[in-house]
Every structure is written in C-alpha cells, then in structure tokens.
Amino acid sequence: MALTAVRWDEYVRFSKLPEQDRRLEFWAWNIIADKDLTINPRYHRLELYGTTAFCPTGTNALMVYTRPMSATEAMKYDEKLYRDNNNGVIDYSVKLEDFKVQAFVDDKEVKILSIQNMTEQYGNQKMGAFLMMLDYTVRHDDTTIHQIRITAENAKHHEKGENICFYLSPDFE
C-alpha cells in the first residue's frame, strides 16, 4: 500500500541535529507492485502525506489529494503537546498562499487547473490539506498504471518535498 523513507537521525521529533537540519519523510502511496519497481525517494522539510489520485464518477478528470506538513511548524509542538493532543489543535500543515506545487503524470508535467483548501479531520485533530484538479484526461479503458509525482515548496519556510502515488483506472478488469 505505501512506502516511506526517512533517516531517523534527521527526523523532526527525534533528531538531536540543529533544527535547520531536521527533516520529515518521503511517501509513495497506492503502490501497485506487480512487477519490478524503482522508487527514488527525495525528501527535505516538507512532507506530502496521504497523496491519493482518483477520477470522480461521471468525469474523466484526474484529482489528487495531499496533506503537506511543515517541519518548521511541527517543531513548534513539544512532546507534551503531542502527548496531550493539545485539545485537537496540532496543525503543521501549509497555507494555500505558501503552497507552490507542480504535478507530473508519468514524468510529464501537467497543469494544475484548480487547488481547493480542505480540512482533514481524524479523531479530534484537524489539519489543512488540498484537493487538486489536474489537466489530465483519464481513459477508463486504460490498462497502464500511472505514476503521479507531486513536488512542492512551502514558500513561507523555504521547505521542499516530493512524493508519488500510483493510479490505475478502477474500470480496468
């Protein structure tokens, strides 16, 4: 289902490194491992979590959901706040005005037609996320597994991140 890559000695919450050298992680989602696959994880201080691609019923538009998380914002919460859940207010996501993003399908850049703010809620915790519509037409008879790569920057803190997810038309049998 997913692959993550992180060096624990650099990870934001566990690292003894100076704050500017701490990082979050890389994720690959919805991996379809039916043949050999090479994934080259590249990550920095912006984590793009939960990235999922889908085609809404009745359309042929490719939609991508992702939740970007900032290492700088994450470091504002100490261990007590994490443990106590800070009354549901642990949000180290990125604001839309600071989210500079590119999308690639099978290593070709595609235009992002729209980006919508979302609020992801799990338990009593809320974090910001985005839903993006890509300028990519999904063919419902397509048998190809597509790799979607999202690269982004949190312009507020000059943090970069990247992840991938895979998409196969659910109509393919």
Image (tube, helix red, strand yellow):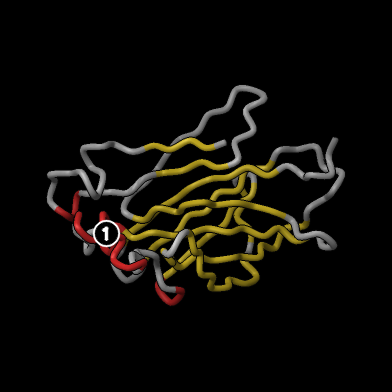
Q: Residue 124 in the image: x percent, y percent?
A: 43, 64
Identify the residue under disc 1. 84
Between 17 and 146, the one lying in front of the other is 17
Say which quarter of the image contains residue 70. Answer: bottom left
Q: Quadrant of the N terminus?
A: top right
Q: Residue at x 40, y 72 (%)?
A: 98
* 100 relative to 19 in the view: left or right: right
Q: Quadrant of the C terminus?
A: top right
Residue that lies at the very extreme toward the bottom in this rendered image: 97
Label 1 sits on what residue type? Asp
Q: Residue 96 in the image: x percent, y percent?
A: 46, 74
* 28 relative to 70 in the view: left or right: right
The relative height of residue 144 versus residue 34 in the rendered view (above or below) is below
Q: Residue at x 64, y 52 (%)?
A: 53
The relative height of residue 115 versus residue 48 in the rendered view (above or below) is below
The relative height of residue 152 versus residue 94 in the rendered view (above or below) is above
In what element is the residue under mark 1?
helix
Q: Residue 160 in the image: x percent, y percent?
A: 37, 56
Q: Residue at x 28, y 49 (%)?
A: 23
The relative height of residue 96 versus residue 6 in the rendered view (above or below) is below
Q: Residue 158 in the image: x percent, y percent?
A: 30, 64
Q: How many marks?
A: 1
* 93 relative to 121 in the view: left or right: left
* 32 relative to 76 in the view: left or right: right
Q: Residue at x 58, y 59 (%)?
A: 65
- Dot 1: within a 10 Å radius of its alpha carbon, few (fewer than 14), some, or many (20 or more) residues? few
Say which quarter of the image contains residue 72. Answer: bottom left
